[in-house]
Amino acid sequence: MTLSEQSYASVLSAIKDAVSRYKGNTVNQEVTDIHLQPNQDSGELLIFNDDEEELSRVRVNEWIDYGSDAFNKETELVLRKAIVELKEQGMFDDLSLLKPYSFVLVDDEKETIVELMLVDDEDTLLLDEELLKGLDEELDAFLKDLLEK
């Protein structure tokens, strides 16, 4: 999926608007993640916190009635690119969010599809499916081995 420059700028602006609500006040830190919910039917990107408080909303014309089953995967790539770009610009520095917090892609039922980025005290971790592939099996094997001893 290729977005026009205008649509991509709108996505960047919406994410900036959402996190700007948490800029500056590092004394009273909040515990929340930032949820991004793209909608294939309306073309809207809704951004909200853990309390489902809407932080920002934008319409992306290219998403309206996008005719592919890979909509979530396609939007994941676009949103991950935007978040990385904003991170590199320092947009997430000095937020009043208690670390660790995440940028999370969610579906229409607000169920997590994938974590786009995890921000922690030590570092920022960009999550990737390849990095996490097989982790469940490894943890299960480790736990089984541990319990058998």
Image (spheres, rainbow, N blue to C red):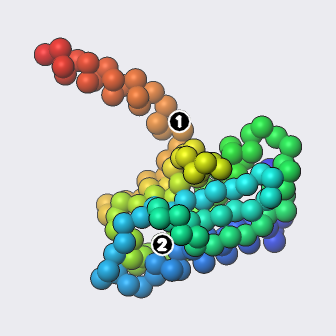
Split into 4 quadrants, where in the image is the C terminus?
Answer: top left
Q: Which mark is residue 101?
A: none
Viewer-closest of 20 and 43: 43
C-alpha separation, residue under disc 1 versus residue under disc 2: 25 Å
- Res. 98 in view: yes
Quick one: label 1, few (<14), some, or many (20+) residues within 10 Å? few
Kindly state the secondary structure of the residue where label 2 is placed: loop
Residue in front for this viewpoint, 29 or 8: 29
Can you say whether 145 is above or below 9 in the image? above
Residue 27 lies, with reference to residue 62, above or below; the image says below
Q: In which quarter of the image is residue 45?
A: bottom right
Q: Is mark 1 on a helix, strand or loop?
A: helix
Q: Which mark is residue 130?
A: 1
View extreme (bottom): residue: 24
Percent x, y of residue 27: 30, 82
Q: Which residue lies furthest to the left in this view?
A: 149
Query: Residue 44: x and y, percent?
Result: 74, 62
- Residue drawn at x 68%, y 70% is 57
Residue at screen point 46% across, 81% down? 23
Q: Would residue 106 appear left or right of 71 to someone viewing this image?
A: left
Residue 90, percent across and down?
Answer: 50, 75
Residue plotted at (53% across, 80% down): 20
Instruction: Please say if 144 is above or below 24.
Output: above
Task: Say how many tags the image has.
Answer: 2
Extreme residue in the top direction = 148
Label 2 sits on residue: 92
Kindly identify the amino acid type of the residue bearing the numbered disc 2: Phe
Give the image location of residue 100, x and y in percent.
36, 60
